[in-house]
Structure formats: structure tokens, C-alpha cells
Image (cartoon, rainbow, N blue to C red):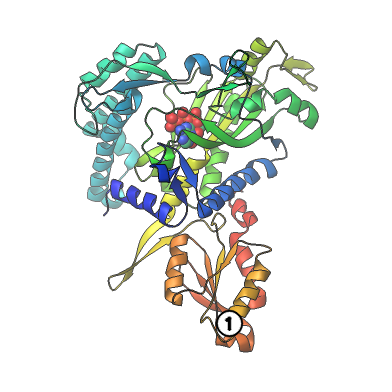
Amino acid sequence: MANQDDTFKKVISHAKEYGYVFQSSEIYDGLSAVYDYAQNGAELKKNIRDYWWRAMVQMNENIVGIDAAIFMHPTTWKASGHVDAFNDPLIDNKDSKKRYRADVLIEDYCAKIEAKIDKEVKKAAKRFGAAFNKEEFLSTNARVVGYQEKINTILSRMAKSLENEDLADVKALIEELAIADPMTGSKNWTDVKQFNLMFGTKLGASAETAMDLYLRPETAQGIFVNFLNVQKTSRLKIPFGIAQTGKAFRNEIVARQFIFRMREFEQMEMQFFIKPGTQGKWYEHWKAHRMKWHLSLGLGEENYRFHDHEKLAHYADAAADIEFKFPFGFKELEGIHSRTDFDLKAHEEHSGKKLQYYDNEDKESYTPYVLETSIGLDRMFLAVFSNALEEEDLGDGKTRTVLKLPSVLAPTKAAIFPLLAKDGLPEVAKQIVEDLKWDFNVIYEEKDTVGKRYRRQDANGTPFCITVDHDTLQDNTVTIRHRDTMAQERVKIDDLRAIIKKEVDVRHWLMKMK
Ligand code: ATP
């Protein structure tokens, strides 16, 4: 079995080779942690965004979408807490001169202990067979209980130290655990320092009048400052939500994991405004609902898990991550946060404007509480893409590389081939492209043998290949080949549209959320 590093390297090189993701400004040797989406990547990303938007906005009568500007009044970031508290604890290794997030070093240490637990579970499952009870094993096996206690002790001490700004203790923890630089093994660390992640810029023509601005580090604040405008013009009643997708910028200290952690990335966020006191119910609702969205795409239930936060952000009274099994292990993909009335209250205070809601039924005004769902579009892209990439064993020593993207998200839905580039076959194939392109992204291909064209489309993630041959000229039928099963069937040209639609239609996929 390939190790994690190899799998991840394959994902990155496949993304480049098949026109999904390129390093930004590659001809100048690239810009660290910034990436460009290429011809196929842009389509896949657009389709994921669209799938999210439809599930959140179109399918929910009480959720509307906006598109706020990246630049916002600088006081926004004072109110939100980002100027004072949007920091990561960083630590440098004096020998390697490499910089790390101190909390990530500690979390990675715990992940290694967790891997030991997984190993014990696997061993025991094998030993006990059908009689194996995982829950019971986890709570009774002395070694496993010991590992879990160690993890809990470490993480709660770290959470406490970070909350109390006790950075000396974070360093002490790293030293006590003998954590070494993962690249070099050196344990020669500097002190831990706080580092603000916002990018600053200036607005205005002259140095004297220029105003200091930030590139937004999250899209959420564009929703909060528009809360009342949207509520009044949409006449929505609480509970209701405002959704938005857009770019966010963070000067990440360590960004070595391809599009998992970028300095410029895209978020898909929804803020759900609710009556104070109902947050527990809505927190559970959105956790379950967002998980359903993920599962509807069929990436495998075993690849997701919830992680409840030990350390809560300054604005939250409950928070959980939906973690996904990336090629480098389980990591955060989406956050569900119960944000209380922190944001609206803070904006009221800093702007001097009332941001309250008048409840007609209860005849009272209040500052709504907020439940947030926040997912990184690029991380979702990586989840979908890495999960789809397979080196499939075809027997007899043969393999094929296939990108089993959910067909609703695939950049190209069908590739249409003439068996040979003569005898009038290209004309018929091009006519099929002309007909289908009104509904789907399709392409025409005539280069190389059909076998090679199939392989290329498999690696590209195209769900259908359609081949026009000499029989087509007689009976108007073509061969349609399915990417995942490689099954081929003979169908009428007139039926193609319906066959493809059945498989790629958003409706068919979203129905799985019911
Ligand atoms: P992390 O702990 O991984 O830094 P976070 O908890 O700071 O993430 P949030 O502020 O909750 O992340 O942002 C919501 C979502 O935005 C995350 O779940 C993630 O999918 C995405 N995201 C955050 N930072 C980045 C980044 N640098 N690159 C790509 N996606 C990101």
C-alpha cells in the first residue's frame, strides 16, 4: 500500500497534469501557498460552489445569498476581534530556521498517539472478529484508555494556556513532550510568539489621506454588517439565514499542504439568525444538515467525523468541525459555530447603530443569536479530488488511473469520439456535441486510439464517453461507456440527453439529502 506522502504527491501531480490546479506564477518559480485553478479545476470548483449554493439558498426558503465586497471599513475588524485576537502562536526552530504553528506541533503529536489507538483497535477487531465491540474496547482496554487520557491532558493544557495567553507554557509543553522539528529532528526552539494573520493594504491616492485596510480574513463579517439591510428588504422573519461565497485572505505561518492551507482561498459561509435560547437546537440541526450535504456526494461515510472543540473561539458557545480523511489524515473541512450575539452586539457597539430584530409574535426586540456553517471551497475541492483519484487494478497486471468524481461535479460530462477520423464519422460526432452542449459541458476528441481516449477521459474524471462508429450511420445508435464500471451500451442518439441528465442532474444528487 502506498504511504500517505506518496498518495498526496500523486494527487498534486495529477491535479497539475490534468489541468486542475497550477502553482501561482509558476514561470517565476511560484508564490508560496497561492494556487491557480486551471481549465478543469475552475469547472470543478464552480460546480462545488453551485452545489453548495443550491443546497443552502435554493432549497431553503428562509436563506438568501449575498455577495459583499472584499474590502470593508477597517472598524469591522476591530469589532470582530480580528485586530486584537486573530493570531496564531508561532515558534521557530533555531537550527533549521523553519517556522511552525506551536498548536499544530502539539496537535500533530496527539495525532500520532491517536494513530496508536487506531492500531490497537484494528488489532483487536481482527482478534475478536464478529464479537468485537469498538465502544467497549475503547473504554476498557487499559493501554487505549491511557493513550486517550494522555491526549486529553495535553490538549486541555494547551487550550488553557492559549486562552490565558500563557505562551511560555505552550513552549514548556513542547519541550516536555520532546517535540522535534518534523523536518530535521532538532529540538532547539525559540519562544512562542503571537502573529496576526490579516493582510494589510491601503486605500486612497496619497500617503497622507490613505486609509489602512485589511483584506478580509473571512466572509462572515460582510453578512453581519448587512444583517439589517437584508432583513428589512427581504422581510424575512427569524429564523433566517444569509449565505455567501467569496475570497478570504490569511497570512498563514505554515502553508505546506497544497490547497488545504492557502494564503488566498475561498469560503462558503452561512449565518443563521435565531432567537436567543434556541441555539442548542439549531446547532444540532445544522451539524446534521451539513453532514447530509457531504454524504449526498458519496465520498464515503467512513471518511467523515465530527470533532467538538475543546478551545472555543472568543465568540462561540459551542463549535464542532466536520473533519475529512485527507491523504494526510483527518483534518478540518468545515466548521459549525454557535456564535451567540457576539458579532451583532460588537457591530452595534462600534457603529452606534441598532442591529436588533423586532419579533412581531412575541412583541419584543432582541439581538439575534447566530449559528454559522463555514466551509473552505478549496478544502472541499481537495476532499473531492483526492477521494476520487484511484489507481484501479484491472487484473493481468494492468491498471488504470481513474478520477471518480461525483458526476454532478465533474468538469466535463461527456466526451464524444468518432471511432475513426474519416468516413463521415467526425461530422456525426460533432453534431452530437452541437446538440448536447446546450445542456452539458461536453468535448469532442478524435486523436489516438479509442482505448487511449477512454483512459485519458477516465483520468480527467469524465463520467461518459460516447463513440460514433459505422453502425451509427445506419441506425443512429452510439456506444456509451460509463467511467466507473467501464460498462458499454448501445443507445439511440436521441436518448443521450436523457441518459446523461439522469446521472448528472443536481436534483438527483440533492434528493439524497432528504
Ligand atoms: P484551521 O484551524 O485549519 O486554520 P480555522 O479553524 O482557522 O482553520 P475557520 O476560521 O473556521 O478555519 O474557517 C472556516 C473554513 O475555512 C475552514 O473549515 C476551512 O475549510 C477554510 N479555511 C480556513 N483557512 C484556510 C486556508 N488558509 N486555506 C484554505 N481554506 C481555509
Q: Mark 1 points at which residue?
A: 425
Residue 288 is left or right of residue 484, and the answer is right
Residue 221 found in image quarter: top right
Q: Where is residue 201 in the image (x, y as percent from the top left)?
A: 54, 23
Residue 329 is left or right of residue 39, and the answer is left
Q: Where is residue 300 in the image (x, y as percent from the top left)?
A: 45, 51
Q: Which residue is drawn at 20% across and 32% down?
A: 184
Q: Where is residue 169 in the image (x, y as percent from the top left)?
A: 30, 13
Residue 367 found in image quarter: top right
Looking at the rendered structure, the kind of residue marked 1 is Leu
Q: Which residue is drawn at 63% across and 58% down?
A: 505
Any part of residue 320 in sight: no
Residue 254 found in image quarter: top left
Residue 319 lies, with reference to residue 260, above or below; the image says above
> In the depicted view, which residue is nearer to us: 38 or 239?
38
Question: Element at badge 1?
Answer: helix
Q: How crowded is mark 1: few (under 14 residues within 10 Å), some or many (20 or more)?
A: many
Q: Where is residue 217 in the image (x, y as percent from the top left)?
A: 53, 27
Q: Which residue is drawn at 43% across and 39% down?
A: 260
For the image, the number of numbered tags is 1
Q: Residue at x 58, y 79 (%)?
A: 426
Which residue occupies the extreme front position in the image? 206
Any part of residue 218 in sight: yes
Residue 88 lies, with reference to residue 464, above or below; the image says above
Answer yes or no: disc 1 within 8 Å of ligand 1: no
> In the depicted view, which residue is nearer to us: 503 or 146?
503
> In the depicted view, which residue is nearer to us: 251 or 110?
251
Quadrant of the drawing holding the N terminus: bottom left
Residue 422 is left or right of residue 440, and the answer is left
